[in-house]
Amino acid sequence: MDDDTPGERTPPIGPRDDPAMPRYGGIATFALLPQLHEVPHADVAVLGVPFDAGTSFRPGARFGPAHVREHSRQLHPYHQVLEVHPFATQQVVDAGDVAVGPYDVAAAVLAIEERATALTTAGTRVVAIGGDHTIALPLLRAAHAVHGPLAVLHFDAHLDTWDVLHGATLWHGSPFRRAAEEGLLDLAACQHVGIRGGVYGPAELADDARLGFALVHADEYQHRGVPQIVEQVRARLGDRPVYVSIDIDVLDPAHAPGTGTPEVAGLTTRELVTTLRGLRGLSVVGADVVEVAPAYDHAGLTGLAAAHVAWEVITLMAPPGSAGVS
Ligand SMILES: [Mn+2]
């Protein structure tokens, strides 16, 4: 654990600030932030997880981290709606990628857990960039090791609480079932948002509810709207430690075509972003943005959306009272 008192901390090192180098030049760390080894302590680390061996349909999310970094070059240091400087009020870094191979899923899950746990136990919150949704399980283990049972806010077209597929228990449709079985989740406080696809029958929805998830269907954005959904989600999560898991397929394929299991009639990017902004003040202790598969992307739509929602989550992590810091 970090034992610096807040008053003794050096000011955070912000994004690259070279007046001679344009944003599109140079190496793309996330949001042009410093790397982990360049700072004495990181409050938040963006961690790439180039792994997609748990994918059930279109592969390619292993290339997600590099794609999201490349589309994060235009992220700026001030959030003008929440009035927060996310990179000045906490030390945010790019921690690079987990060294993870493509063949052995169990070994990969262990490698992700070990790398993420090294960060969380050092007092660093992880914002992971996937990779397919399998990676949420080891990331939840790493967050749970420090924070205890987690209220999971899960944005996705799909439930991801399924059991076995093709004989495998670890795949991108099962991370939240495994997490519930392991006691990582606060079963009174988990919430899906944006669900609409992939269900064979009502029994799957009943099974999902039994695991502890409340559910907002994507359709509810049409007739209820963002403010009412935000109110419901905030009431559900309360003041518990919140883990935000964002499968980019929660967005409509018009907004995020570059993903492995697209489903029509999803959220707009604006609906997702404004929902996230409504969560300011919650205790967000970890997050992932997953399922960006660049080969199916067009004009960087999916990469831009993923980079931006990661930035929104990092802004939610900024300490309270940080508005107005210059
Ligand atoms: Mn998913």
Image (tube, rainbow, N blue to C red):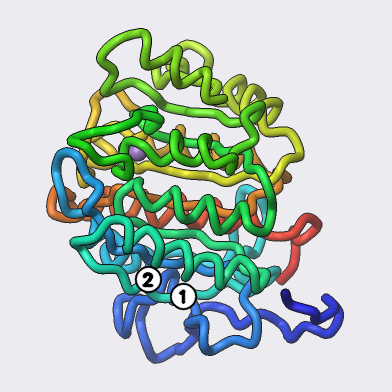
Say which quarter of the image contains residue 235.
top right
Horizontal and vertical percent for residue 158?
34, 29
Going by the image, does 203 lie left or right of 275? left
Q: Residue furthest top?
A: 202
Residue drawn at x 22%, y 45% as measured from the top left: 55
Name the amino acid, label 2.
Val
Residue 221 at least partly seen: no
Residue drawn at x 56%, y 38% as measured from the top left: 152
> Please, what secondary structure does the residue beneath circle 2 have?
loop
Horizontal and vertical percent for residue 241?
69, 46
Q: Crowding near pointer 1: few (<14 within 10 Å), some, many (20+)?
A: many
Q: Tell me whether circle 2 and circle 1 mark residues in contact (CB < 8 Å).
A: no
- Assign the C terminus to one quadrant of the image: bottom right
Residue 128 at least partly seen: yes
Image: 277 above or below 100 = above
Horizontal and vertical percent for residue 14?
57, 79
Q: CA distance from mark 2 to mark 1?
A: 9 Å
Say which quarter of the image contains residue 8.
bottom right
Work out whether residue 4 or residue 67 is closer to the camera in this orientation and state it. Answer: 4
> Please, what secondary structure does the residue beneath circle 1 have?
strand
Image: 189 above or below 28 = above
Q: Which residue is mark 1?
A: 95
Image: 208 above or below 4 = above
Q: Crowding near pointer 2: few (<14 within 10 Å), some, many (20+)?
A: some
Name the amino acid, label 1.
Ala
Going by the image, does 127 lie left or right of 69? right
Work out whether residue 39 or residue 115 is closer to the camera in this orientation and state it. Answer: 115
Say which quarter of the image contains residue 177.
top left
Q: Which residue is mark 2?
A: 98
- Can you tell me which quadrant of the image ligand 1 is in? top left
